[in-house]
């Protein structure tokens, strides 16, 4: 049982308190209550304002990565662990059928990162599909993620090539998902080699500096990145974190960015409310911020942790090889539309 109501909680806690009186202090605290929220009541048609593109608190930076898990994710998780920093991963559920990628996503969740999902229509158009077909397809991806981490994702990144499909966007919104955009592109698909990936940090540096020069105060950023090996996201990350640290910004997950205590859905299809877990914004284990990390500016980290480890602790090289060519196809499709243009396409 994952959720315990307040009445039941006190029923469990009371005998412990009574038993502890006059003796040693109670060793076991009552479990922390888990936050819940009702349905999203904003049910009108999707507009640009429905896309999350900045945070509520100036000075926050939410790094988000789409299209993983991949060979790059483990290296990113190591860097993030060293920095004690948290990000958001939009999982492509298709990859979770491979044991080693499933292990990586589970690892990311247990490390305290927020797990969202990506979605792309099977034929890149909602035409020819019923509403129910589309809902069931989204739900299938969502359930695959829930099977692995125990919660249904709420934050959703729609694949670039589907962003001009209002019917899909309206359906996703009506299901209670939170649509995520961005206001900063880290250009990791452009700076995609070990040497040029250092330029990614310069994108942040320039953004922070221009903002400060123009307005004399910090802004907030939802940053789009790609968690795939053919981008510089992993090798550029250490310097990105150090740049964020130097400018005095605060790294947050998307729930910290929106002050959302309930960043997961109760149901993969219905708009019937949301739940938080122990690491969600406002909960005991929620973490934000970062510390600077060591990195080698010559880019020798390129292959660190490149081979993912399966959930059984072993690597499965044959599956990795089998999936490599389709992985490249996935990356090519990501690059088909420049992400910076994605929001401009809307409506
Ligand atoms: C996930 O990856 C598969 C396989 O490469 C791809 O066909 C699909 O479009 C991707 N899904 C999303 C939501 O981008």
Image (cartoon, rainbow, N blue to C red):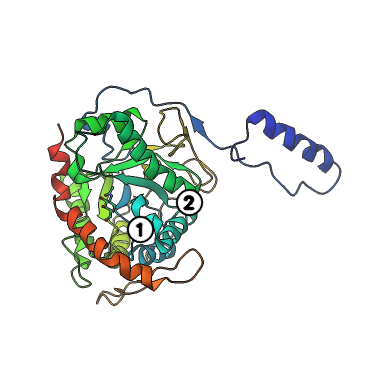
Looking at this view, name the residue that lies furthest to the right. Answer: 22
Residue 202 image offset from top left, x and y in percent: 19, 61
Looking at mark 1, is its residue's CB closer than 8 Å to ligand 1? no
Disc 2 on helix, strand or loop? helix
Q: Which mark is residue 344?
A: none
Q: Position of residue 34 (x, y in %)?
A: 56, 37
Mark 1: secondary structure: loop
Neighbour class for label 2 at 10 Å: few (<14), some, many (≥20)?
some
Please name the residue that numbered disc 2 is placed on.
Answer: 148
> Relative to 88, is 341 on the left or the right?
left
Please say whether residue 47 is visible from this viewpoint: yes
Residue 134 to residue 232: above or below = above
| Rendered-image quadrant of the N terminus | top right
Q: Residues within 10 Å of mark 1 (few under 14, many from 20)?
A: many
In this picture, residue 264 sits left or right of residue 211: right
Q: Position of residue 65 (x, y in %)?
A: 30, 53
The answer to whether residue 287 is above or below residue 100 is: above
Callouts 2 and 1 close, C-beta under 8 Å: no
Of mark 2 and mark 1, the one earlier in the sequence is 1
**What residue would you read off at disc 1?**
69
Q: Is residue 24 above or below residue 347?
A: below
Q: Say which residue appears at 78% left-offset and 40% top-offset.
A: 16
Residue 260 place in picture, x, y as percent = 42, 37
Name the foreground residue: 294 vs 336: 336
- Residue extending farthest front: 128
Can the viewer see residue 305 in this picture? no
167 left or right of 112 in image: left
Residue at the spot 27% in from the left edge and 46% down from the top edge: 221
Q: Quadrant of the C terminus?
A: top left
**Residue at x-position 37% and y-position 52%:** 87
Spatial CA span between label 2 and label 1: 13 Å
């Amino acid at each position: 049982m994952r959720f315990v109501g307040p009445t039941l909680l006190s029923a469990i806690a009371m005998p412990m308190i009574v038993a502890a009186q006059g003796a040693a202090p109670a060793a076991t605290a009552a479990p922390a209550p888990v936050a819940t929220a009702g349905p999203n009541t904003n049910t009108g048609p999707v507009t640009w304002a429905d896309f999350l593109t900045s945070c509520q608190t100036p000075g926050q930076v939410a790094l988000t990565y789409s299209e993983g898990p991949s060979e790059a994710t483990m290296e990113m998780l190591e860097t993030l662990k060293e920095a004690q920093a948290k990000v958001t991963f939009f999982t492509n559920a298709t990859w979770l059928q491979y044991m080693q990628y499933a292990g990586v996503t589970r690892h990311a969740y247990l490390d305290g990162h927020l797990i969202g999902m990506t979605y792309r229509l099977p034929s890149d158009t909602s035409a020819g599909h019923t509403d129910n077909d589309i809902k069931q397809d989204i739900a299938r991806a969502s359930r695959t993620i829930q099977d692995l981490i125990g919660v249904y994702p709420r934050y959703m990144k729609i694949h670039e090539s589907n962003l001009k499909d209002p019917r899909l966007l309206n359906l996703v919104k009506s299901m209670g998902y939170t649509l995520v955009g961005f206001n900063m592109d880290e250009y990791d698909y452009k700076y995609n080699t070990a040497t040029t990936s250092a330029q990614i940090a310069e994108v942040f540096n320039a953004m922070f500096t221009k903002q400060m020069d123009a307005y004399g105060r910090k802004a907030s950023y939802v940053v789009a990145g790609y968690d795939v090996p053919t981008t510089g996201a992993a090798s550029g990350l250490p310097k990105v974190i150090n740049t964020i640290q130097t400018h005095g910004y605060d790294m947050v997950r998307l729930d910290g960015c929106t002050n959302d205590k309930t960043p997961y859905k109760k149901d993969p299809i219905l708009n019937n409310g949301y739940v938080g877990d122990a690491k969600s914004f406002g909960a005991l284990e929620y973490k934000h911020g970062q510390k600077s990390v060591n990195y080698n500016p010559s880019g020798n980290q390129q292959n660190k942790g490149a081979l993912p480890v399966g959930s059984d602790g072993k690597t499965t090289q044959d599956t990795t090889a089998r999936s490599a060519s389709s992985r490249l196809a996935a990356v090519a499709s990501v690059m088909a539309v420049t992400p910076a243009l994605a929001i401009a396409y809307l409506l």
